[in-house]
Image (cartoon, rainbow, N blue to C red):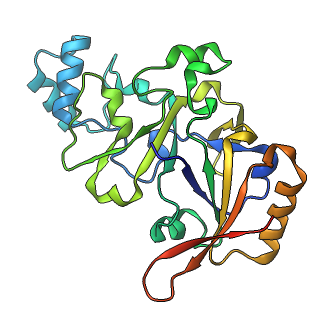
Amino acid sequence: MEDIIYKYMEFREEFFDTRLLRFTPRLYLNDPFEVRPSFSEHAEYVHRVNGYGKSVNSVIEEMKRNQHLVLKGVAVQDFDIYGILSLTERNDNLLMWAHYAQDHSGMVIGFDPRHEFFDASKSSKKYVRNAVSEYIGVLKKVRYAKHRKSKGSSLDEYFFLKSNDWWTEREVRYVLPISEADEFRKNESGETLAFYQVPGDAIVSVIFGIRASEDNINRVKAKVRDSRIYRNVKLYQSKMCSEQYNLFIQPIDA
């Protein structure tokens, strides 16, 4: 794991007051393949573990007839009790700045991956502690592959498996139970959003985009400067390389 992991976001001044991070259910992520086992692996699992269907092939055929079928007692249903926090090892990805950080006018927050927040076995919430496994409640890098095939015995590995097309994002994920989130909000579509609050001392840096306004930068500077919990936070701004399609990250004074 890198020394710092990053979260791309739109400019959100209120983040420095609330420190809320959304944990998103798989079905609301932008990739329709998110946490979806292959039919063959899914069928083998539910037939072997849940005793569903006459055979693995019969389960596969049933799934092909109705791809939205929710099979009785299937572990796939359990996927939906968890939310995913998507982070990355990179702070200079041009596409991620464009897609996730408001066309380079947003910001990237740096976190200390060694902070207790990212180790759910140390959570004050019993249900969260009890949910910890090889894949739940621990920071883990996403594995990129051509085929939808896990390497282990748990379908929870699919939380960390994506197509090779996404490899440049170098994603790191943190998966926690939605029910134990610190705050819930409704969006304009009526969807319930779940947020966990990250401690202030888990934040180590803020990087502003190339197009971030001076006013926005100064407002965050004031919040960092005036709060003791942000005393170790370093501020930066991304700058455009003069010759290549690259960014360099330049320190700025608080």
Near-viewer residue (2 or 104): 2
Quadrant of the rendering where the C terminus is positioned: bottom right
Q: Position of residue 246 (x, y in %)?
A: 46, 77
Give the camera-side residue of 7 and 155.
7
Q: Which residue is outermost to the bottom?
A: 243
Q: Nearer the viewer, residue 90 or 62?
A: 90
- Snapshot quadrant of residue 109: bottom right
Q: Position of residue 110 (x, y in %)?
A: 61, 52
Marks counted in the figure total 0
Residue placed farthest to the right in the image? 226
When the figure is inspected, residue 171 is found, relative to residue 159, above or below; the finding is below
Image side of residue 203 versus residue 54, left or right: right
Q: On the picture, is 160 further left or further right than 176? A: left
Q: With respect to residue 248, does 139 lie above or below?
A: above
User: Can you give x and y, in whole percent of width and height, for residue 199 in the image?
Assistant: 72, 37
User: From where the camera sits, is residue 65 visible?
Assistant: yes
**Does the rendering let one see residue 128?**
no
Question: Who's the residue at 75% across and 41% down the image?
Answer: 200
The N terminus, quarter of image: top left
**Residue at screen point 65% across, 43% down:** 21
Identify which residue is drawn at 63% across, 21% down: 123
Image x and y of residue 150, in percent: 23, 33
